[in-house]
Amino acid sequence: MKFSNQFTDAELNELQGAAVSWTTHAGRGTTFISSSNIRANTVADRSGVGNLDSLLDGVFGVYKATTWHRDLPNSALAVTQIFGVRQNGGGSDEYVEIVEGDILVNYDDFPFLPEQNGGYDLFTVMIHENGHFLGLNHNYNFNSVMYPSIGYSTFYLRPGTFDVSSIQSKYNISSGGAAPSAARRIASVESASTREDVLKSGKGVRITLELHAHGECVHKIDGTRVGSHPVKLK
């Protein structure tokens, strides 16, 4: 994972802490998200790209959107965008293999701690969004950072026990088994021909999860709204 060069040092510390928290508390030797040497590996901020599909660029990026993208709703605190490939299409075991993802944090419309007073806690927002990054959906278990309720008074310090069991089950590491190679999955989208296949073939899919400040989470596939549910922002 790489972070935008627009984040401050204090914000980068929060972003890295939220990223490595999943490995520290649930990894059992498996690294879920690597973000070492973050200040030497920042990337140009691409939150203002003209076409959101162009974010499929081989970089798992977190962007500080000081100008919110015109194709995204202004009421969204943050948006996780996931590119994937449908596997076992039509079967009972159909799933989407994640090949890349990006997180856009809406600094254009909302304040965030630690740099701005009275804002949303950046660590909390990011540990939640990183859960989406890893393939977790929202749920209503109160012992979960994936509970769809993030407000000024919400502070997560680590994934909950429900999150730990969910992520270990998803990556088959509950009994010490190895997770799929993240390096292999990232490399699989680094050629133009592969990106074209992911986006335009019958198997390619772009999923967005929008957490809205007005109390709704909206799920979209390839830009089309496929579901939503209410949230209670504290």
Image (tube, grey):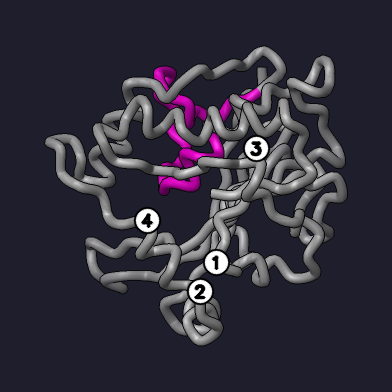
Q: Nearer the viewer, mark 2 or mark 3?
A: 2
Quadrant in the rendering for residue 181: bottom left
- The answer to whether the residues at label 4 and label 3 have Cβ atoms under 8 Å apart is no
Which secondary structure lies at badge 2? loop
Which secondary structure lies at badge 4? helix
Upstream in sequence: badge 2 or badge 3: 2
Which secondary structure lies at badge 1? loop
Q: Which residue is mark 4?
A: 182
What is the magenta segment's predominant secondary structure?
A: loop
Upstream in sequence: badge 2 or badge 1: 1
**Label 2, residues with CA under 10 Å away: few <14, some 14-19, many ≥20:** some
Residue drawn at x 79%, y 47% as measured from the top left: 65
- Observer-nearest residue: 150 or 198? 198
Upstream in sequence: badge 1 or badge 4: 1
Quadrant in the rendering for residue 207: bottom right
Magenta residues, start to end? 128-150
Quadrant in the rendering for residue 220: bottom right
The magenta stretch spans residue 148: yes
Q: Which residue is mark 1?
A: 58
Residue drawn at x 60%, y 30% as measured from the top left: 231
Upstream in sequence: badge 3 or badge 1: 1
Whether residue 11 is situated above or below residue 45 in the rendered picture: above
Q: Which residue is mark 2?
A: 190
Between the residue at mark 2 and the residue at mark 4, the CA separation in whole angstroms equals 13 Å
Upstream in sequence: badge 4 or badge 3: 4
Q: Which residue is mark 3?
A: 216
**Label 4, residues with CA under 10 Å away: few <14, some 14-19, many ≥20:** some
Kind of residue indicated by mark 4: Ala
